[in-house]
């Protein structure tokens, strides 16, 4: 399986994500720079990792979403390329229009850096197929703008179509997101965005390995 | 030509920063503040001289980058 991780100025989780992908695929992912206009041939998955692209200027993810590499990713995503956006990556792909809604300032106004409990609501996606539906895993979050919002019609559709992939378990919503939404998938099923950082809960040194099955799901997809 | 653009959150979109300002004003003794919404303001200098064309340009800029129309409204003033 061939994977790639995108780096924008201000991104800081690309190394963690590349390490996670290498752990399950056995191959070092291609590291793509934001100015590139084409994706490598035969790519199965591109990950937009976390960080603070462009210092979160204007709106988090807004400037990165308009970069050359995102045009290439958008075009390929429409053809079915799998895309995973984590944290700032979720904000970027949402700003790029690959997922509906928006991520705004945490309701508490605080940057939240801690572990949350994440419930797998949909285990038929390329990132959750090794999980049981309803399974709850520990996963770290680290963000100031993870408060997912969308219009009521979109929210109804997301829920009705099972497109909420991850939800913060009761009492652990760190940001005020609607319906405790932590991650969603697009209608076609090939684009997933999530605020928590599963790449930081997969090795013994992370303390727990709860999120390893998420990455292992990539192999089956 | 100068364009002045105001970007505001749509009604119904939670504005925790506005809420914090509202609270801070109250604690400073400014009573009677019923509601605060925070927005953004941009000044853009344009080479374009024709107001209609300038407005069209700025509208495209807003739709493409300056505002996220999922959550924000924008207002353009030329001067």
Image (cartoon, helix red, strand yellow):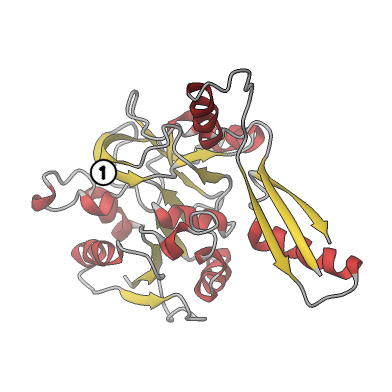
Q: Pick the residue in front: A110 or A143.
A: A110
Q: To which quarter of the image does residue A46 belong?
A: bottom left
- What residue is at 66 percent from the left and 53 percent from the top? B41
Q: Find residue A199 and report its horizontal and vertical position in percent.
A: 25, 54
Q: Pick the residue in front: A43 or A11.
A: A11
Q: Pick the residue in front: B45 or A149.
A: B45
Residue tagged 1: A140
Viewer can see residue A190: no
The answer to whether residue A212 is left or right of residue A118 is left
Q: Find residue B29 and report its horizontal and vertical position in percent.
A: 53, 21
**Quadrant where the C terminus of chain A lies?**
bottom left
Q: Find residue A138 and report its horizontal and vertical position in percent.
A: 23, 38
Secondary structure beneath label 1 = strand
Q: Residues within 10 Å of mark 1 (few under 14, many from 20)?
A: some
- What residue is at 42 percent from the left and 81 percent from the top? A40
- The vertical placement of A29 against B59, above or below, is below
- The vertical placement of B52 against A174, above or below, is below
């Amino acid at each position: 399986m061939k994977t790639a991780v995108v780096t924008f100025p201000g991104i800081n989780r690309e190394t963690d994500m590349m390490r996670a992908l290498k752990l399950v695929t056995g191959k070092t992912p291609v590291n793509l720079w934001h100015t590139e206009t084409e994706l490598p041939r035969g790519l199965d998955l591109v990950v937009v990792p976390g960080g603070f692209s462009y210092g979160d200027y204007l709106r988090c993810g807004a400037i990165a979403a308009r970069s050359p590499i995102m045009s290439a990713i958008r075009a390929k995503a429409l053809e079915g390329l799998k895309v995973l956006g984590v944290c700032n990556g979720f904000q970027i792909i949402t700003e790029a229009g690959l997922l509906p809604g928006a991520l705004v300032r945490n309701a508490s106004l605080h940057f939240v850096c801690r572990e949350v409990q994440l419930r797998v609501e949909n285990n038929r996606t390329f990132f959750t197929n090794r999980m049981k539906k309803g399974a709850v895993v520990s996963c770290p979050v680290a963000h100031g703008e993870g408060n997912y919002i969308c219009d009521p019609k979109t929210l109804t559709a997301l829920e009705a179509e099972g497109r909420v992939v991850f939800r913060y378990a009761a009492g652990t919503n760190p940001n005020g997101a609607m319906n405790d939404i932590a991650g969603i998938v697009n209608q076609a099923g090939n684009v997933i965005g999530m605020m928590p950082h599963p790449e930081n809960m997969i090795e013994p040194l992370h303390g727990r390995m709860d999120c390893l099955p998420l990455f292992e799901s990539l192999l089956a997809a | 030509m100068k364009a002045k653009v105001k970007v505001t959150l749509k009604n119904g979109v939670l504005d925790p920063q506005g809420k914090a300002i509202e609270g801070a004003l109250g604690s400073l003794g400014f009573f009677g503040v019923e509601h605060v919404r925070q927005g953004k303001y941009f000044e853009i200098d344009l080479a374009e001289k024709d107001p209609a064309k300038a407005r069209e340009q700025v509208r495209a800029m807003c739709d493409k980058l300056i505002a996220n129309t999922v959550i924000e409204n924008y207002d353009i003033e030329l001067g």
